[in-house]
Image: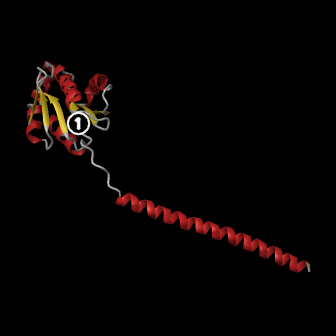
Amino acid sequence: MQRMTNVGGSLLQLMATLSKQLRLENLLESSRELNERIEQQLEEETIPESSEATKHVAVFLDGSQVSLLALQWALQHVLTLPTDVLYLVNITPHEEFKEDSDRILRQGYEKARSSRAIIHKVSLSAEQASSVGEAVLDFANEKNIDVAVMGDRGMGSMKSSLMGSLGLGSVSEFCARNLKCPVLVVKDSGEAVSR
């Protein structure tokens, strides 16, 4: 009799275990079905197009007043949505100008931080590219920049003579001719010219 009770108890335990396993399998199957339905709905859903899309805007800063005017112009006229992305970019001829680059980017960030845009500070060295213009071109292509904004000139006399000795020429002119995206060149009067 005791043997039958043990067998009966074992049978009940087995049934309870099978029942739990069956419920778990049912839950798992229900979960799979739910996931499939959610994935199908996500695939079928269309995202409504907004009247304006997010823009990726690069403002190239060199520490000059005209580059700060370019930033101000971009903040007032180009960056309109909180989802817009603003790249504050400083390109130095050599790595040893890193401290200057950090200062220039901090100055630009202070001007831009009240904007609704998402801000990234980027310091690049032209040593990896053949020129500052090529570094701008590489960056704009890599980040899929929609609009590039820069001053028409304004490097200080020391930096300007250094750049000239490196044979870099006019960066804004190079960019206006070679970038795939629109280029806004802001003059020292605050007037913007686009290519």
- Please give the name of the residue rendered at 25% of the width and 34% of the height, measured from the top-left corner: 124
Q: Quadrant of the N terminus?
A: bottom right
- Disc 1 marks a residue whose amino acid type is Val
Question: Can you say whether 17 is above or below 172 in the image?
Answer: below
Quick one: SS at disc 1? strand
**Relative to 162, is 131 above or below?**
below
Question: Viewer-proximal residue, 43 or 181?
Answer: 43
Q: Nearer the viewer, residue 94 or 72?
A: 72
Q: Position of residue 6 (x, y in %)?
A: 85, 76
Q: Residue at x 64, y 67 (%)?
A: 23
- The image quadrant of residue 139 is top left
- Tell me where residue 107 appears, x and y as whole percent: 28, 22
Q: Nearer the viewer, residue 66 or 35?
A: 35
In this image, 187 relative to 124: left or right?
left
Q: Is residue 34 above or below residue 192?
A: below
Q: Residues within 10 Å of mark 1 (few under 14, many from 20)?
A: many
Q: Position of residue 114 (x, y in %)?
A: 32, 25
On the image, numbered disc 1 is attached to which residue? Answer: 57
Quadrant location, the C terminus: top left
The quadrant holding residue 27 is bottom right
